[in-house]
Image: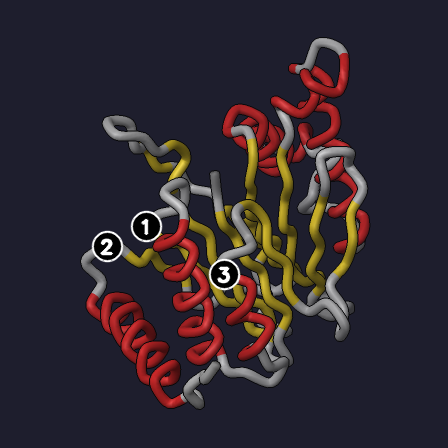
C-alpha cells in the first residue's frame, strides 16, 4: 500500500510520500513514489503515485521518456501549455497503461489500478494541484478541498482536517505531514519510512526543499514521541465520564 499527500498553500505546494511497496513478515521493500520534472524559469511538475507498482512505474517511465529527447516529445508534459493539459496527458497515459495490462472485466482492471497526485506551475498561471483516477479523469484542489491524499488515507486525515491552514509556512506544513504520516505508519504495516518530501515556492519555477526522512531521523522521532505524549496529556485533561 502507500500514503501520499499533496497540499496547496498560499506560499506554494508541498508533497510527501512514503516509500514502502510491500510488507510482510520477511518481505519489506521500498521504491520512490515522488517524481518531478522542471524547466528552470518556466515550469515545475511533481507527481506522486499509489497503486499497482508495475502500472505506476510504467506511467513514470513513459512520461520521463517523452520528456528527454525533443523528437520524442509528442505529447510531452514539458511542452504542454497548462497544468490542466498535463493532467489530461497523465490521465490518458495512466488509462492506457492499465488497459494494456488488463485482460477483460472489472476485476482485471482493478488489479492494475493506480491513483496519482499531480502538482506544479507553468509560467503565467498559478500553482495547481490535481488528483487523477485510474479511469483517467481527475479533480482539482480548491479552497474547499485544498489537499489530496492517496493510498492509505483514513488514519492520517483527522489531523490534516483539524490543523491545516492555507497560510501555513512550509516548516509548519512539514511538521503537520509528519504527524499525519506517523499516525498512518503506527496504524498500518503497509505504510512506512523512509518518507520523501518536496516543497515548491510560487513563481520560482524550480524545486524548493527536497529530502528524505529516514527511520533514524531525530526530528521525526521527536515529533512522533511528542505527539503521542501530547495526545495522552490532552486525553487526561478531558472531563471525566460518569454513569
Q: Residue at x 49, y 67 (%)?
A: 199
- Label 1 SS: loop
| First in residue order: circle 2 vs circle 1 | 1
The number of callouts visible is: 3
Using a 10 Å C-alpha cutoff, classify the residue at mark 3 as few (fewer than 14 neighbours), some (14 to 19) or many (20 or more). many
- Can you say whether 75 is above or below 195 in the image? above
Q: Which residue is mark 2?
A: 215
Whether the residues at callouts 2 and 1 have beta carbons within 8 Å, the answer is yes
Question: Where's residue 211, x and y in %?
Answer: 36, 59
Point 56% across, 49% down: residue: 37
Task: Mark 3 or mark 2: name the one nearer the start of the chain.
Answer: 3
Picture coordinates of residue 221, whole percent (x, y): 24, 66
Numbered circle sitting on residue 217: none
Q: Nearer the viewer, mark 3 or mark 2?
A: 3
Q: Earlier in the sequence, mark 1 or mark 3?
A: 3
Choose top left, top right, bottom left or bottom right for residue 114: top right
Q: How far separated are the C-alphas under marks 2 and 1?
A: 6 Å
| Image spot of residue 99 (x, y percent) | 73, 19
Q: Residue at x 23, y 54 (%)?
A: 215
Q: Which residue is mark 1?
A: 193
Q: Are marks 3 and 2 in contact (CB under 8 Å)?
A: no
Residue at the disc numbered 3: 156
Q: Secondary structure at mark 3?
A: loop
Q: In the image, residue 66 lies at what x, y percent? A: 64, 32
| Left or right side of 58 for 235 | left
Front tag of 1 and 3: 3
Label 2 element class: loop
Say which residue appears at 52% left-offset and 60% top-offset. Answer: 15
| 3D distance between C-alphas at marks 1 and 3 | 15 Å
Amino acid at each position: 500500500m502507500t500514503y501520499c499527500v499533496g497540499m496547496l498553500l498560499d506560499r506554494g505546494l508541498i508533497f510527501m510520500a512514503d516509500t514502502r511497496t510491500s510488507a510482510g513478515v520477511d518481505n519489506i521493500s521500498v521504491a520512490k513514489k515522488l517524481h518531478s520534472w522542471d524547466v528552470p524559469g518556466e515550469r515545475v511538475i511533481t507527481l506522486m503515485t499509489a497503486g499497482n507498482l508495475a502500472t505506476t512505474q510504467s506511467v513514470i517511465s513513459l512520461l520521463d521518456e517523452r520528456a528527454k529527447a525533443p523528437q520524442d516529445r509528442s505529447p510531452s508534459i514539458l511542452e504542454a501549455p497548462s497544468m490542466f493539459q498535463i493532467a489530461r496527458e497523465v490521465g490518458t497515459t495512466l488509462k492506457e497503461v492499465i488497459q494494456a495490462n488488463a485482460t477483460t472485466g472489472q476485476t482485471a482492471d482493478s488489479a492494475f489500478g493506480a491513483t496519482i497526485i499531480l502538482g506544479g506551475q507553468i509560467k503565467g498561471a498559478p500553482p495547481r494541484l490535481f488528483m487523477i483516477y485510474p479511469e483517467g479523469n481527475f479533480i482539482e484542489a480548491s479552497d474547499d478541498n485544498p489537499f489530496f491524499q492517496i493510498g492509505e488515507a483514513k488514519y492520517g486525515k483527522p489531523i490534516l482536517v483539524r490543523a491545516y491552514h492555507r497560510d501555513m509556512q512550509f516548516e509548519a506544513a512539514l511538521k503537520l505531514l509528519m504527524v499525519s504520516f506517523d499516525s498512518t505508519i503506527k496504524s498500518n504495516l503497509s505504510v512506512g519510512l523512509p518518507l520523501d518530501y518536496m516543497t515548491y515556492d510560487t513563481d520560482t519555477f524550480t524545486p524548493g526543499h527536497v529530502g528524505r526522512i529516514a527511520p533514524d531521523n531525530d526530528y521525526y522521532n521527536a515529533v512522533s514521541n511528542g505527539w503521542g505524549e501530547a495526545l495522552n496529556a490532552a486525553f487526561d485533561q478531558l472531563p471525566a465520564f460518569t454513569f
